[in-house]
Image (spheres, coloured by chain):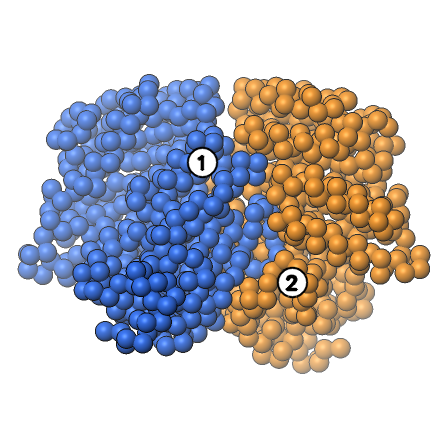
Chain colours: A orange, B blue
Amino acid sequence: MMEKKIIRSLRDIVGKENVYTENSDRITHSYDATQKSYLPDVVVYAHSAEQVSEVVKIADSLSIPLLPRGAGSGFTGGTLPVQGGIVLVLTRMNRILSIDTDNLIAVVEPGVVTSELQREVEKLGLFYPPDPASKDFCTLGGNVAECAGGPRCVKYGVTKDYILGLQVVTASGEIIRTGGKTLKNVVGYDLTKLFVGSEGTLGIVTEIVLKLLPKPEAKKTMLVQFETIDGAARAVADIIRAKIIPTTLEFLDAATIGCIRDISPIPLPDECRALLIIEVDGDSDVIEKQAARILDIIRPLGVLDTRIAETDAESEEIWEVRRKVSPSLRKVNPDKFNEDIVVPRSKVPDMITALEHLSEKYDVPIVNFGHAGDGNIHVNVMVDLAEDGMQEKVDMVMKEIFHAAVALEGSISGEHGIGISKMDYLGMEIDNSTLDYMRRIKRALDPNNTLNPGKIFESDVSG
Amino acid sequence: MMEKKIIRSLRDIVGKENVYTENSDRITHSYDATQKSYLPDVVVYAHSAEQVSEVVKIADSLSIPLLPRGAGSGFTGGTLPVQGGIVLVLTRMNRILSIDTDNLIAVVEPGVVTSELQREVEKLGLFYPPDPASKDFCTLGGNVAECAGGPRCVKYGVTKDYILGLQVVTASGEIIRTGGKTLKNVVGYDLTKLFVGSEGTLGIVTEIVLKLLPKPEAKKTMLVQFETIDGAARAVADIIRAKIIPTTLEFLDAATIGCIRDISPIPLPDECRALLIIEVDGDSDVIEKQAARILDIIRPLGVLDTRIAETDAESEEIWEVRRKVSPSLRKVNPDKFNEDIVVPRSKVPDMITALEHLSEKYDVPIVNFGHAGDGNIHVNVMVDLAEDGMQEKVDMVMKEIFHAAVALEGSISGEHGIGISKMDYLGMEIDNSTLDYMRRIKRALDPNNTLNPGKIFESDVSG
């Protein structure tokens, strides 16, 4: 337990009602979507950058670990208090400060929920593209910390591509500003992009300047059923090779389809061994042309059925198929180990082959779906941990999956970050010299290791 | 002069024929586009990352300043050997290593000239958007070092947005790799974007992985003459407000038009007080619609004449008007001080007003043109330094221009960087805490201050 004196200081900063020390409060802030759990000493809710600054100063001066936290929807343990300390929750800093339709920017606090911002800007004819699956509850601060992605990144890029500037509280409690409100800015080092994806280890984001786009005039959603996974993979490659970049190119493999067959709003026969959800957006005439060309391209590749949404409701029905996936996977086995590897688009078929081979070799079901258009595959190793030696088997499978991704010039994480889950595998992708370079930045900017300690590259890394 | 022993070591690394110590060689590598000049001790041409690494190791161990250099076309002195030392030229590392049409990426050495890459990828139906004015002679390595922009950035973004990965030689001579070949990658800190725009002060880029786009099907170029600068500025704002993002939105003010009137391929009458060059690209039907809408929007704003290019040759003729600008400015006065401030798009009219006011207040011609679509204005203070006290006057005007840009939530440099030219003004835009954060990164990654010393924030900074 934390000393009374420290608790009193925290209460002085944020008010008594924003400091939680009860067991129940600590437990509810002890886990994230990884379902691992570490108990913090105290939970503090901040309402301003100044409060964040004061809390950080206490933590830094007393060597107390400080864990910034949004909605806790991360998949790699980024917000978990693995060494105890203060969990600093930013969800009540949730104001949209401005939406500037002249300059196509928005300024928000970190606790704003992603889809809330999207709804608000869409009312004004604008568009914020990044769309992580958790967008209805995750926060923009968390999106910045992890550099969140989503299906639309094929065409529109990731969170990083939409962050123009930040207000950040540093490890010593100073409030700094990076970047600004202009698209061009080459004044000093780009601290903005350094903070994006740094998983709360370099500073705490307290304000975000976002770039917006005009809202596309129309979109067209298609669900295509394939006889083989090869056909679907070739379709992805051929569409890009034809110089068409759809908004989304989502794929589901046969095992995934098996999980949702009973509950899918659209019938998925046994012969359907792979699905693509293809969406194009933009000018209404152009998307008609693009859709027609896409259908021409994929026709020879073993297409069983094509459904083209004519209305928003029909489009939603297609996306409902995709949304059924995550909640259904546990039908295969009770325990899920999900990773989000990424390979160059053209290597998706090779990666799928490698995954099939590993599934056979280790006799474990591997269920794959995700963002084929940018090579980002959500790989789910489904097991029953109650079985003897299963954790060790999972560890071996995971390691081989990561090796395969890196061997194909890919990466061990496309969207979820490293956190604690992938720390041991970091050395597979990044050599020691480069890791040393990153560690030097961490030490220079957080010399007391106050901010989110024990994350990304704290432990030994080995190939 | 450099010790014979060191020269011998350098010759051992790159070969005798790639080490230049003659006065004439040193003089030709002593200046860049700022026309300031500092003599290096020796000039070395490298042909591989390994050679760069070995040269850096010598420099770092002996505390010799090392200045990476491409074409030397920079506008802020980024490559100037202000403290002498080794100028390391990378223009002979000029191979396009691969163009991958399946994954829309290219891998190049830093010495490749920007427009050469553009031509090569366009042959394959692909597109590399960043287009600095110097694209026919500047190098991609220099573009990365300065985060180059250009007219097309309004729609397509800057160099940073197209850099997926780098090979970099660090200050200690290690060869590291950052990022990779995938659009998504959240594995450790984003060193890639940290290097882009770091002006050669953190590492030397020896290989670049670039993101490409499909080449737009068609483009449409329009030259619009306005009665007033206000009309042109309002046109820019109204086009963006109508949710149209053209490829380029270039503007020329009355003073600029005056400089080119006699040599313009398109007649520009005295009544024309401002020009916009508007280009849209994409699907051929869409650009027809966009062009028509743009003309509707701007019609009430005092348009004198509109020329719409129907052929590539006519488009080239319009761009020729723009290209005449830089070589013609010295008609006004022999000495040019050009800056590339940037303000939020909607503040361009306010910035123009401020510049007119300063021109009157100090009785100096200020000639303005540039990328109005992203608020990036090339401001040229034209004087005759032979006049008494003129340099002091220029310094005062510059300071006021930067103050005005920052007061409008803008930046003192959109494309050109800080180098030595803007070092003294850095503190106007970036507060001391943030600067300290940047300096800590520099010290952590280049502890002996070997790489491009005396640049960006070496001197005292004051507001």
Name the image quarter holding the C terminus of chain B: bottom left
Query: Which amino acid type is shown beneath numbered disc 1?
Result: Val
Callout 2: few (<14), some (14-19), or many (20+) C-alpha neighbours within 10 Å? some
Q: Residue at x 15, y 61 (%)?
A: B392
Q: Nearer the viewer, residue A84 or A27?
A: A84
Callout 2: residue from which chain? A
* Discs 1, 2 touching: Cβ within 8 Å: no
Q: Which mark is residue A427?
A: 2
Q: Is residue B25 above or below residue A310?
A: below
Q: Which mark is residue A76?
A: none
Query: Which amino acid type is shown beneath numbered disc 2?
Result: Gly
Left/right of residue A263 with respect to residue B259 in the rendered view: right
Q: Is residue A92 visible?
A: no
List the residue tagged with mark 1: B121
Q: Residue at x 33, y 42 (%)?
A: B135
Callout 1: few (<14), some (14-19), or many (20+) C-alpha neighbours within 10 Å? many
Please provide percent x and percent y for residue B264: 18, 29
Please provide percent x and percent y for residue B330: 13, 44
Q: Residue at x 26, y 43 (%)?
A: B352
Residue A21 is drawn in which quadrant?
bottom right
